[in-house]
């Protein structure tokens, strides 16, 4: 056996081949991530939320065995996968300023949720009744992956729907706030129905109206923060050229629309359908996602 044919040489050659395929620049990493998301849109944006809706309902109804019922790591993994199109879409627009302001928004998220759990302000008295991973002071450590994508999706959808009018900060503010609140009108009744958290009753499918007043405050903080985080021209350019950037919102429509429909929460289910129509209008709900082999 020649030296070049030795196992060591073959192993070194294989390692070198693998390293050559790993991107070594930020642009290369971003392009690779774009390709991964683009090639798996059906799995991420349709299959995962459909399975999520089935398993959450199954857990709430006692159909799932104990190791799987409301398994927090299973839930967090599914959420992380569904968030990936948004994260990958936003990634090229992130700079130090954006990271800093998103850090501020994360800090606000923990603060306002901790305050809400302790005092009932501003959302109304509530508690988490199911573990969503590690908890600190009654608040999930993974809270930002639930909150920030919700407001970011609303923000991006409004940029698309508003067109040139989105150049005005006041227009963005007064458009995004009701959109965020409307998304929570879909989310909270479904989450209460499956038992994620509990308000102890409320006028709107078990959710008190004070909750939505609290979301006006949080949406306002979020919009102001996002306006300062991102270069508007860059984020709008990326949004225009990245067809999967709102696929996380497609997942939202399927997951929470389906759960609300199952439990007879017809107003939230209809509002989820309205968001689906908005995505169709912006050419972001690709019908091919529902026919991956067509």
Image (cartoon, helix red, strand yellow):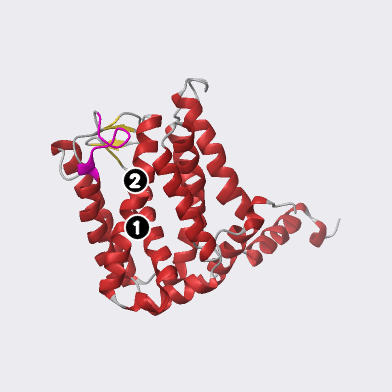
Mark 1 crowdedness (10 Å alpha carbons): few <14, some 14-19, many ≥20: many
Taking the spot 69% from the left edge, 51% from the top edge, the residue there is 291
Task: Work out whether residue 132 can be spotted.
Answer: no
- At numbered mark 1, what does the secondary structure look like: helix, strand or loop? helix
**The stretch drawn in magenta includes residue 120:** no
* Residue that sits furthest to the right in the current view: 1
Q: CA distance from mark 1 to mark 2?
A: 10 Å
**The stretch drawn in magenta includes residue 206:** yes
Q: Nearer the viewer, residue 293 or 100?
A: 293
Q: Quadrant of residue 136?
A: top left
Where is residue 116 shown, x and y percent of the image? 19, 41
Residue 103 in the figure: left or right of residue 76:
left
Magenta highlight: main SS: loop
Where is residue 198 shown, x and y percent of the image? 28, 31
Q: Nearer the viewer, residue 10 or 202?
A: 202
Taking the spot 39% from the left edge, 42% from the top edge, the residue there is 267
- Determine whether 138 is above or below 147 in the image: above
* Residue identifier under label 1: 179
Please state, as top left, top right, bottom left or bottom right, where the C terminus lies in the image.
bottom right
- Determine whether 46 is above or below 90 in the image: above
Q: Nearer the viewer, residue 183 or 118?
A: 183
Q: Quadrant of residue 286?
A: bottom right
Residue 70 has which mark? none
Residue stretch in magenta = 201-211
Where is residue 31 shown, x and y percent of the image? 57, 69
Please state, as top left, top right, bottom left or bottom right, where the N terminus lies in the image.
bottom right
Where is residue 2 shown, x and y percent of the image? 84, 59
* Residue identifier under label 2: 185
């Amino acid at each position: 056996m020649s030296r070049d044919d030795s196992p060591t040489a073959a192993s070194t050659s294989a390692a070198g081949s693998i390293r050559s395929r790993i991107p070594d620049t930020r642009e290369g990493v971003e392009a690779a991530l774009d390709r991964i998301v683009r090639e798996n849109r059906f799995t991420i944006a349709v299959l995962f939320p459909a399975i999520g809706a089935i398993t959450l309902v199954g857990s709430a109804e006692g159909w799932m065995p104990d190791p799987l019922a409301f398994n927090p790591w299973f839930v967090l993994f599914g959420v992380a996968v569904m968030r990936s199109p948004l994260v990958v879409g936003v990634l090229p627009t992130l700079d130090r300023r954006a990271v800093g302001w998103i850090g501020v928004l994360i800090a606000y998220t923990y603060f306002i949720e901790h305050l809400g759990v302790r005092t009932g302000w501003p959302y109304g008295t509530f508690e988490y009744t199911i573990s969503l991973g590690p908890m600190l002071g009654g608040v999930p450590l993974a809270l930002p992956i639930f909150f920030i994508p919700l407001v970011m999706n609303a923000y991006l959808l409004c940029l698309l729907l508003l067109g040139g009018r989105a150049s005005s900060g006041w227009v963005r503010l007064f458009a995004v706030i009701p959109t965020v609140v409307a998304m929570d009108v879909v989310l909270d009744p479904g989450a209460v129905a499956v038992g994620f958290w509990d308000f102890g009753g409320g006028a709107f499918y078990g959710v008190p109206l004070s909750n939505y007043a609290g979301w006006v405050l949080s949406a306002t903080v979020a919009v102001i923060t996002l306006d300062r985080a991102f270069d508007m021209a860059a984020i709008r350019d990326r949004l225009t050229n990245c067809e999967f950037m709102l696929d996380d919102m497609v997942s939202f429509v399927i997951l929470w629309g389906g759960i609300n429909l199952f439990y007879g929460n017809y107003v939230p289910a209809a509002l989820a359908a309205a968001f689906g129509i908005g995505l169709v209008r912006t050419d972001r709900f690709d019908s091919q996602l529902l026919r991956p082999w067509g």
